[in-house]
Image (tube, rainbow, N blue to C red):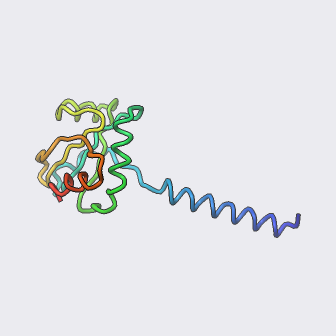
């Protein structure tokens, strides 16, 4: 096979792989920096345990709507098993799959499970938006 054909196939394959990764894996990760709470913007903190299904499913639901609310609302993760995450869980009596909604001043507005229907999730986020 001529070099030009091999090069073309390689470039097209690389482009397709890049497009698939960008399309399906392009959601940026949610930060674990909880110091933004009370810093002038509302914050949603998802309590997350990496091996538990409730947190993984809740994160998927939040990721579906997150881009509609950023940068007006900050989205963060309190990862169970880390010192910061464990402290957050104790302080807010939360568990895997729970989201804590904070207003711009850092006051807790609501502690709730991440709703399944997107419409209900949007209603919850409207409490702080």
Q: Residue furthest bottom?
A: 4
Vertical relation: 52 (above or below) 39? above
Please give left or right for residue 28 compared with residue 69 in the image.
Answer: right
User: Disc count in the image?
Assistant: 0
What residue do we see at 59% from left, 60% from top?
A: 18
Residue 41 image-quadrant placement: bottom left
Residue 53 shown left or right of residue 100 in the figure: right
Q: Quadrant of the N terminus?
A: bottom right
x, y percentage for residue 45? 25, 45
Q: On the rendered image, what quadrant is the C terminus found in?
A: bottom left
Q: Where is residue 72 in the image (x, y as percent from the top left)?
A: 23, 62
Quadrant for residue 79, please give it. Answer: top left
Residue at x-position 38% and y-position 40%: 56
In the image, residue 10 above or below residue 32: below
Q: Which residue is drawn at 29% across and 50% down?
A: 117
Comparing 89 with 23, the one in front is 23
Above or below 45: residue 96: above
In front of the other: 78 or 53 = 53
Residue 38 lies left or right of residue 54; in this view the side is: left
Q: Position of residue 116 (x, y in %)?
A: 30, 46
The residue at 80%/64% (across/down) is 6
In the rendering, at what x and y percent does residue 128 appear? 16, 55
């Amino acid at each position: 096979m001529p070099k030009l054909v091999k090069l073309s196939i390689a470039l097209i394959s690389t482009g397709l792989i890049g497009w698939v990764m960008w399309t399906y894996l392009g959601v940026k990760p949610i930060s674990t920096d909880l110091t933004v709470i009370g810093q002038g913007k509302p914050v949603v903190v998802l309590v997350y345990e990496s091996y538990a299904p409730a947190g993984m499913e809740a994160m998927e639901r939040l990721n579906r709507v997150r881009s509609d609310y950023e940068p007006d609302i900050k989205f963060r993760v309190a990862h169970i098993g880390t010192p910061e995450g464990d402290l957050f869980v104790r302080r807010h009596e939360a568990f895997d799959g729970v989201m804590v909604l904070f207003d711009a001043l850092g006051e807790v507005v609501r502690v709730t499970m991440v709703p399944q229907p997107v419409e209900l999730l949007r209603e919850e986020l409207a409490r702080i938006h």
